[in-house]
Amino acid sequence: MQDNTNLDLMQEKISILEVSNLTVERAGSVVIENANFSIHKGDYVGIVGPNGGGKTSLLLALLNILPKKEGSIRLFGQEIESFSNWEKVAYVPQHATNFDSQFPLSVRELVSLGRITRNNLGKTLKRSDIEAVDQSLEFMGITEIADKRIGQLSGGQKQRVFVAKALVRNPEIILLDEPIGGVDAKTQEKFFKKLSDLNIKKGITILLVTHDLTAVFCRMSKVICMNRFVNVTELNGDVEPEEVLRKAYGEHFHFVFHDHKCERVFEDE
Amino acid sequence: MNELFDIFSLFGFQFFQNALIGGTIAALACAWVGLFLILRKEAMIGDGIAHTAFGGIAIGLFFGVNPILTALLVSILAVLGISYMRQKGLAQSDSAIAVMLALGFSIGLIIISLAGGFNVELLSFLFGSILTIDQVDLIIVSILGVSTILVLGIFYKELLSITFDEESARLTGIPVRSISLAFNLLVAITIVLSIKVIGVILVVALLVLPGLSALQLNLSFKRTTLVAIVIGVLSMVTGVLLSAIFNVATSGVIVFAAVGIFLFTALYRRLE
């Protein structure tokens, strides 16, 4: 059911992220309770669940933006509190594409901001940085709009630009928080195709918060289904989506899954 | 023809040269800092700090110290006070600015009453007196202005990143809190160095109008910055020259020139 099974078999299962007994609170309420899971290099993970189920909180905790109450998060083998190699990690926040449309920034300028690291603070970007920006624009297919102002972009173009900004850091893992809101189905489809390319061709581990359940079960290698409690399922041919999703969405949840939908996804590729 | 000759002859006078050099440095720093302030939606911090600086000017005049230096000290304290109130959750940004504005202005009023009133010198700081910039003022304005421009140039991309998306900037490893504080100190410095040029009351115009005009043109950030600086300097030079021709208050004409350019760019945007 997913398109990177072979990649998993080819790659050594290197653990990138290990979460043990994680509990997170927000405004005094527990939003994640006793979560335990591992993410391996090359995983393409969908994070699904009802609104308020703790999906964004999970990403923020994994990024050490939201402090945890209990448990441990190990990123690239290091405890998150002492982790410093943030160049390896890229994040596309939920609100990324909801910027002020009057902000005077070109696509190239925005993507260039992704090259800022702790090591080049106060220094001008080098030729290698500019080349990385060009490569990132090219990979995301947005070279022709590089000089356009970001306020003039369509929803689909904005998504690609923000992924290009994340990609320009040459990260090993990208975390995306619902970056496909407000765009049509075809644009979503193209976007998921690009993410699959990133995962397969560049070997980048992807964690994606989404409500597009079809994309998760057609394209991804793992699903984190959460509603305060976290259930992680490897997506192989034996998995029944409805069974997985009921753990988060409840017994009344009914998932209408069209087999031909997955086939169409692969045909487009 | 004689009037034109008189205008050109002005360039030979030290006071006029000081006015143009000091004014250009102030306009450049104000336009650059102001563009960031507009994009951070903090334009009123400029007005707040300028009014707070009034208290510093009064302290300087009262104790016979250079008022620019005391205004700088009080403005920096105001910036630190605003940051502290925001960080500790004592007040939102606009309320914190209002508190500091009122406090600074009140200090000024109390000192004026204690001194039994000041002479016209105080008015020159309220409304600006660019043509009275002396060598000492010019040295102070130059040091402060060039330092501000240098720091902005060095941390340009980090400041842009924070201005666009603070959370993402923090994740890329940018020390957001330190750079934001440093920027607010630059705002204080820029305002103080501009007080002699345009005055406490009108300094906000020099901060906001060039950036606002440049934003009408829908350019990239780099070009918007350059255009804002050009508009700021152009407003300044035009204002100084026109005020010399018509013998009217320089700061008022500078603001009128800046408003004129803003209206022109806004019209261009509508016609585009």
Image (tube, helix red, strand yellow):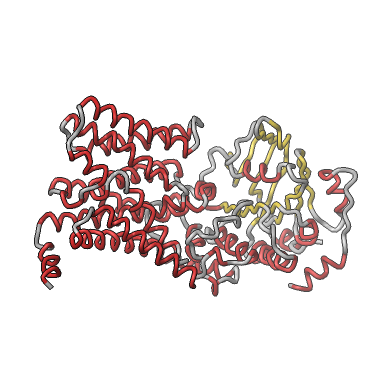
- Find residue A251 and report its image quarter: top right
Q: Where does residue B90 sit, x and y in percent of width and height?
A: 49, 30
The answer to whether B137 appears left or right of B229 in the picture is left
Residue in front for this viewpoint, A36 or B220: B220
The answer to whether B13 appears left or right of A61 in the picture is left
Residue at 48 percent of width and 72 percent of height: B271
The answer to whether B135 appears left or right of B94 in the picture is left
Residue at 77 percent of width and 47 percent of height: A49
The answer to whether A41 appears left or right of B139 in the picture is right
Residue at 67 percent of width and 30 percent of height: A28
Is residue B154 among what the camera can see?
Answer: no
Q: Where does residue B200 sit, x and y in percent of width and height?
A: 30, 43
Q: Where does residue A212 sit, x and y in percent of width and height?
A: 76, 57
Q: Residue furthest top?
A: B114
Name the quarter where the N terminus of chain B is drawn.
bottom left
Is residue B207 among what the camera can see?
Answer: yes
